[in-house]
Image (spheres, grey):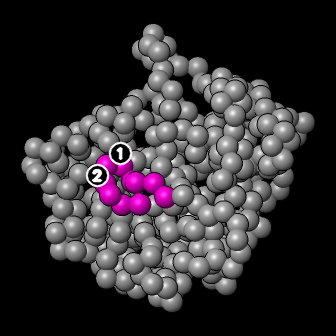
């Protein structure tokens, strides 16, 4: 992929235990075909290509209507050399109101993969991921179906998102016992304000050899530095304002606007000023400093956000400042984790 400039490009990492090499930053396409129109999406994708990126993540439910994000990626991908790109998408959540239009059943997976292939305008998906745990479907059914898709050449690798630690372990041992394709990576929320996954989920990922692809690395905009302790409420029409009004507790003002958060943001600002980087860049780079992380998923809505968020390679945070961020962001652990020494990722 030729670049129009001479700036440094991204490095590539092996995903999990595989030989698949992906760029150290993954471009998330969730806003494409929804908050970001196709023209702007193409500009973001082109800029990602110029910087050496090759890893794009989407899902069948993304966009408005559902599937629109895959269509945008497909329209752009058809103008490129398909073999240059690692395209990841997901299946699990409802694509319609019917009783078999959601979940990780054989029927829903087989129907969904064909629809995703059509929208992406390709004959194979590099990484097909189960978007979340399905308590109603036997894991053997899900894994055997994914195995069949790999054998048929429609999918190259399989992964998972939003599993708990014991669910990762269960999937690993079932696949091993039955001789099925294993999950190769875990997509999970991981950032300076969401570190509880270190207690067990990331331990399980490490034990089972999974690559880790963090989503929401900026905690829904909280780690950009635009929210401050002197605010009484989030700015109107901001992402946090939407989350607050929608009752999305993961990033709502009521749940996140606290002294712990402000302490982390204050430290981010201090380190960003020292490095001449943005607050977002330092928060994202902190993830890249973690050895278990393969590639954080950066999901810019605008080209300006892309220019900022994608520039997190080719430099580093000092070990001393990483330690400061680790200490400032460490959440209070409940029992039994409080009785054990938490591993550093």
Q: Which residue is mark 2?
A: 183
Please state the extent of the stretch shown in magenta in the rendering.
Answer: 12-21
**Left/right of residue 246 with respect to residue 340 in the rendered view:** right
Q: Earlier in the sequence, mark 1 or mark 2?
A: 2
* Residue highlighted by disc 1: 210
Name the outermost residue toward the right.
230
Query: Gap between marks 1 and 2, in whole Å?
Result: 7 Å
Screen quadrant of the N terminus: bottom right
Q: Quadrant of residue 36?
A: bottom right
Residue located at (31% from left, 77% from top): 124
The one of 1 and 326 positioned closer to us in this rendering: 1
Please give left or right for residue 102 compared with residue 55 in the image.
left
Measured as percent of width and height from the top left, residue 292 is found at 46, 40
| Residue at screen point 69% across, 79% down | 4
Magenta-colored segment: predominant secondary structure = loop
Farthest residue to the front: give it: 6
Query: In the image shown, does 13 or 175 lie closer to the viewer?
Result: 13
In this picture, residue 52 sits left or right of residue 281: left
Q: Position of residue 127 (x, y in %)?
A: 36, 64
Q: Secondary structure at mark 1?
A: loop
- Are the residues tagged 1 and 2 within 8 Å (C-beta)? yes
Q: Classify 91 as above or below 264.
A: below
Is 13 colored magenta in this rendering?
yes
**Residue 147 at what x, y percent from top left?**
18, 62
**Mark 1 neighbour density, 10 Å: few (under 14) some (14–19) many (20 or more):** many
Residue 129 on image: x %, y %: 36, 59
């Amino acid at each position: 992929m030729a670049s129009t400039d001479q700036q440094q490009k991204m490095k590539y990492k092996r995903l999990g235990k595989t030989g698949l090499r992906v760029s150290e930053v993954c471009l998330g396409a969730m806003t494409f075909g929804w908050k970001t129109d196709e023209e702007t999406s193409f500009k973001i994708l082109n800029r990602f290509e110029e910087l050496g990126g090759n890893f794009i993540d989407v899902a069948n439910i993304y966009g408005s209507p559902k599937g629109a994000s895959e269509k945008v990626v497909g329209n752009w991908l058809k103008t490129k050399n398909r073999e240059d790109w690692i395209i990841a998408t997901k299946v699990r959540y409802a694509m319609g109101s019917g009783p078999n239009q959601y979940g990780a059943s054989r029927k829903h997976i087989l129907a969904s993969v064909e629809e995703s292939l059509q929208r992406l305008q390709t004959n194979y998906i590099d990484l097909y991921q189960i978007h979340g745990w399905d308590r109603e479907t036997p894991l053997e059914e899900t894994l055997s179906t994914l195995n069949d898709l790999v054998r048929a050449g429609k999918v190259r690798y399989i992964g998972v998102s939003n599993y708990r630690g014991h669910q990762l372990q269960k999937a690993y041992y079932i696949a091993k016992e039955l001789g099925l394709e294993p999950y190769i990576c875990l997509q999970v929320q991981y950032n300076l304000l969401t570190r509880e996954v270190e207690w067990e989920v990331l331990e399980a990922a490490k034990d089972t050899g999974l690559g880790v692809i963090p989503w929401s690395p900026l905690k829904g905009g909280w780690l950009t530095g635009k929210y401050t302790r002197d605010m009484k409420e989030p700015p109107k029409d901001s992402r946090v304002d939407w989350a607050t009004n929608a009752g999305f507790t993961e990033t709502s003002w009521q749940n996140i606007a606290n002294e712990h958060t402000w302490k982390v943001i204050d430290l981010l600002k201090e380190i960003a000023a020292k490095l001449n980087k943005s607050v977002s860049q330092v928060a994202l780079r902190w993830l890249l400093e973690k050895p278990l992380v393969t590639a954080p998923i950066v999901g810019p809505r605008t080209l300006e956000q892309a220019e900022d968020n994608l520039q997190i390679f080719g430099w580093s945070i000092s070990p001393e400042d990483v330690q400061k961020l680790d200490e400032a962001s460490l959440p209070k652990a409940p029992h039994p984790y409080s009785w054990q020494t938490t591993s550093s990722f």
